[in-house]
Amino acid sequence: MTKLGQWLCGLALLGSAWAALALAPPGLRPPAPYRQALLPLPVYLLVAFGCYSLATVGYRLATFNDCEEAAAELQEHIGAARADLRRRGLRF
């Protein structure tokens, strides 16, 4: 199973559990304090997921490794391309 499938199965499981508790018939409803915390739960989870995603992207960006060898090779290719274009008559 792919990671997307795992996430979708988990979201479906959590969503169905939330719907069963939040939309329960009047005789099976949880007490008022639990219900007040349960109704905005999807919004809280969405905000928490956004914060986690932002923190993950920030951390990965901060620990991004430089590739000095690849940068030097790319500069060589750029120099060779410029020399070839100059030889063909293009001015920079």
Image (spheres, rainbow, N blue to C red):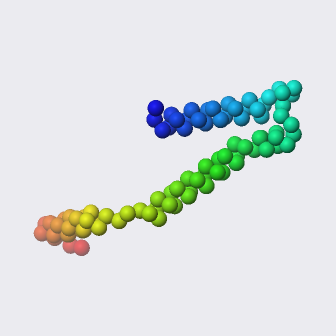
As drawn, the residue found furthest toward the left would be: 87
| Callout count | 0
Task: Name which quarter of the figure residue 79 lies in.
Answer: bottom left
> Does residue 78 show up?
no
16 lies above or below 53: above
74 left or right of 62 in image: left
Task: Name which quarter of the figure residue 84 lies in.
Answer: bottom left
Task: Name which quarter of the figure residue 39 lies in.
Answer: top right
User: Residue at 50% of width from left, 61% of height from top?
Assistant: 59
From the viewer's side, name the closer residue of 46 and 80.
46
> Does residue 4 show up?
yes
- Residue 42's x, y, as percent? 69, 42
23 left or right of 62 in image: right
From the viewer's side, name the closer residue of 76 and 15.
15
From the viewer's side, name the closer residue of 33 and 67.
33
51 lies above or below 22: below
- Residue 63's x, y, as percent? 44, 63
User: Residue at 35% of width from left, 65% of height from top?
Assistant: 66
- Residue 48's x, y, as percent? 64, 51
- Residue 13's x, y, as percent? 63, 32
User: Residue at 72% of width from left, 32% of height from top?
Assistant: 19
Which image quadrant: the C terminus? Answer: bottom left
84 left or right of 10 in image: left
